[in-house]
Amino acid sequence: CVNNHDMPDAAEAIIRALTEPESVLVQVATSGFGVKVLLSSLSLKMWVRTSVSARLFGADDTAGSHSRTNVIRTLIFNPESSTLLKRALRLETATQRRAQFVTTLWGLLEQMKDAKGHPEYDKMVAFLQRL
């Protein structure tokens, strides 16, 4: 999905998503190109997949910040980004980490009951129920 011509931009997108503030993560993970790059990165070496997943689900967020909740909420309601979250969950092979990510999502969805009926909310609930 990312051709050789785009590789420098793709590498920059991954680095920015992993290392810069959460606002940059949201910017990258909600842009068409950024989503494609991050989806592709999940198919790379395990350490890349682990780093991207940890960043998406806030495993590196020791404060459990309100902004992390906003990041995941934003990603859930963007159809392309929601796909990214689902793919990261499906590809997570460490059972404990996967359970932690699922628990994080369920907890957030519980807080967002007002969003029930929104297509992306309902799709995420259905996805988690099938896991």
Image (tube, rainbow, N blue to C red):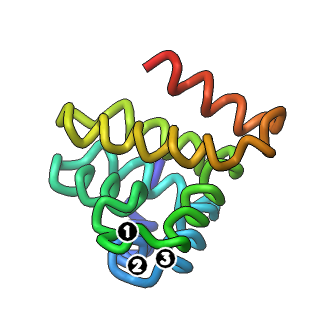
Q: Residues within 10 Å of mark 2 (few under 14, many from 20)?
A: some
Quarter assignment of residue 67: bottom right
Q: Residues within 10 Å of mark 3 (few under 14, many from 20)?
A: some
Mark 1 touches mark 2? (CB < 8 Å): yes
Please name whichever residue, 90 or 72, is drawn nearer the observer in this view of the structure.
Answer: 72
Q: Residues within 10 Å of mark 1 (few under 14, many from 20)?
A: many
Which amino acid does the dot numbered 3 rest on?
Glu
What residue sits right under mark 3 in the picture? 22
Which amino acid does the dot numbered 2 rest on?
Arg
Residue at 47% of width from left, 47% of height from top?
1
Q: Position of residue 48 (x, y in %)?
A: 23, 56
Q: CA distance from mark 1 to mark 2?
A: 5 Å
- Is residue 79 shown above or below 70? above
Please name whichever residue, 33 or 94, is drawn nearer the observer in this view of the structure.
Answer: 94
Which tag, 3 or 1, sits closer to the chain's start?
1
Quarter assignment of residue 9: bottom left
Residue at 83% of width from left, 33% of height from top?
117
What residue sits right under mark 1 in the picture? 14
Please name whichever residue, 59 or 31, is drawn nearer the observer in this view of the structure.
Answer: 59
* Numbered circles on residues, count: 3
Residue at 23% of width from left, 52% of height from top?
50
Tell me the number on the disc at residue 16.
2
